[in-house]
Image (cartoon, rainbow, N blue to C red):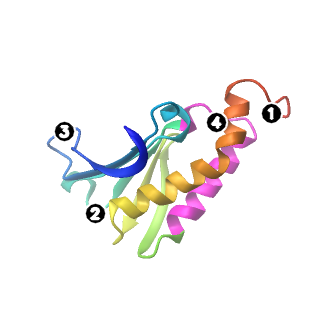
Amino acid sequence: MGEEVQQATPLDEELSESWERLPDSETHLRGVWVGTGEFLEGYWQVAIFAQEYFRQDPLGPELRQRLQTALRAVPGVTDAAEQDNETWMVSGSPSGEARCRAAANVLDELADRMRNVYEGLDDEY
């Protein structure tokens, strides 16, 4: 685990490729996992661990909007949509690494705010 985006061993035989950014001390807020396989029919799944904690509060919709914007802005992406609260489906030609970096950048930009809300230090939310 670490601060850098890196290629990872696929979690199971159905996946052909995966990438991750798993910060040692803040995987729950800044962690990203990206994977693809034949069963995804050209899509990549992008898992955002922080979305588990930010659903209905004001930071949740902002986080989702910023992720959607960032993922769609990766050159070659044709669509990015939420599959469920913590998982996105992203189509197009970019590498898993590029998709992972785009999501990680959003999480880094929001890290201080997410940390404060998660730790109960921000009464605004």
> Is residue 118 within the magenta segment?
no
Residue at 34%, 56% (x, y): give it.
Answer: 44
Residue at 68%, 47% (x, y): give it.
Answer: 61
Residue at 64%, 48% (x, y): give it.
Answer: 63
Q: Position of residue 117 (x, y in %)?
A: 72, 31
Q: Quadrant of the N terminus?
A: top left
Q: Position of residue 105 (x, y in %)?
A: 55, 56
Q: Name the residue under label 3.
A: 12
Q: Is residue 82 above or below residue 113?
A: below
Contact (Cβ within 8 Å) of mark 1 with mark 4: no
Contact (Cβ within 8 Å) of mark 3 with mark 1: no
Which secondary structure, mark 4? loop
Alpha carbon distance from label 1 to label 4: 12 Å
Q: Position of residue 52 (x, y in %)?
A: 55, 32
Q: Say what amino acid the circle numbered 1 marks.
A: Tyr
Q: Mark 2 points at which residue?
A: 42
Q: Name the residue under label 4.
A: 55
Alpha carbon distance from label 3 to label 4: 28 Å
The stretch of residues the image draws in magenta is 50-72
What is the crowding at mark 3: few (fewer than 14 residues within 10 Å), some, or many (at least 20)?
few
Q: Say what amino acid the circle numbered 3 marks.
A: Asp
Q: Position of residue 51 (x, y in %)?
A: 56, 38
First-in-chain label (2 vs 4): 2
Which secondary structure, mark 1? loop
